[in-house]
Amino acid sequence: MTVRVLVVRAPGTNCDFETVQAFRELSCDVTLMTFSKLVQNRKLLHEFNILVFPGGFSYGDYVRAGAILGKKLIARLGTEIRDFLKSGGLIVGICNGFQILVEAGLIPGTDDVKVALTTNVSLRYECRWTILKYESKSSPLSNNLRVGSILRIPVGHGEGRVVTKSRDDLKFLIENDLVLFRYAKPDGTYAEEEYPWNPNGSIYDIAGLQNIDRNVIGMMPHPERAFYTWQLPDWTRNRELVYREKFADGYLILKSLVDHASRIAK
């Protein structure tokens, strides 16, 4: 079956076209729609398998990054979102999209655990390539990733630092397998919150999380910016790789989502 993907943008979104292109490369039927139009046509949501919130600065990131759209999402489409997830839908947030899903309370998806995304420890916008280590044994990404898989994916954010209200909340995330990615060093060991390998100071080097039901995932790094080999920062020094391999590590992440959605929809 053809997986149908809805990419939602708002004023300030700036990674929507790259996200659309990546999913189209994966043979998906992709629709790009503004949030306001989705609110006006809310029944359309149930025609899709994957709902994506891409990166950028929705509504200028006023108040907090992703706060305005996150609250609007629940206030205006809360019932539809819950029904979409119950029917087998998958929600994905990348960078600003991750911030939106956290602000909406969809990640981690339980009121007992408090998670937030706040200002980078460096107090500046961080745009750099990072090394990720895949952690989860039970996420939609496990279709093409194994625990311990190392990936190169770039970040670009000013408020990407994952924090929890308490150590018990962090323990809950770890013990319930909600941590998807952790920042790592070039040798594959964890960043241990060391800059610049951990670009924002996230607790436990967290770069991505999923919700308790495993159907909402969010990550700060941008897989759509590392989808093709020619997007890699060192591609001019590895031209043979570009000719030999079309796709880079971001492809594995997005393909896993599509494979998951295809299996669930059958």
Image: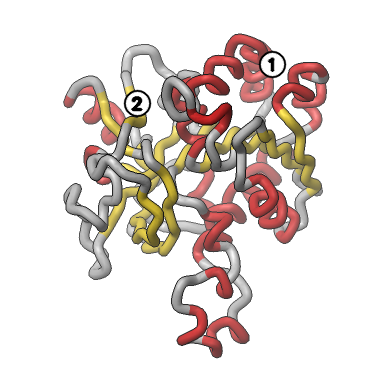
Quadrant for residue 227, please give it.
bottom right
Q: Could you tell me if residue 212 is visible in this image?
A: no
**Closer-to-camera residue (158/70):** 158
Residue for point 44% across, 57% down: 154
Q: Is disc 1 surrounded by few (<14), some (14 to 19) or many (20+) residues within 10 Å?
A: some
Residue for point 67% across, 37% down: 50
Q: Earlier in the sequence, mark 2 or mark 1?
A: 1
The residue that disc 2 covers is: 116
Q: Give SS at disc 2.
A: strand
User: In x, y percent, where is residue 190?
Assistant: 22, 55
**Closer-to-camera residue (109/10):** 10
Residue for point 75% across, 55% down: 24
Quadrant for residue 130, please give it.
bottom left
**Closer-to-camera residue (260/109):** 109
The residue that disc 1 covers is: 80
Q: Give SS at disc 1.
A: helix
- For the residues labelled 2 and 1, say whether their Cβ atoms are less than 8 Å apart: no
Judge whether 138 appears above or below 36 on screen.
below
Question: In the image, what residue type sits under mark 1?
Answer: Glu
Judge whether 34 appears above or below 255 on screen.
above
Comparing labels 2 and 1, the label whose residue is closer to the camera = 2
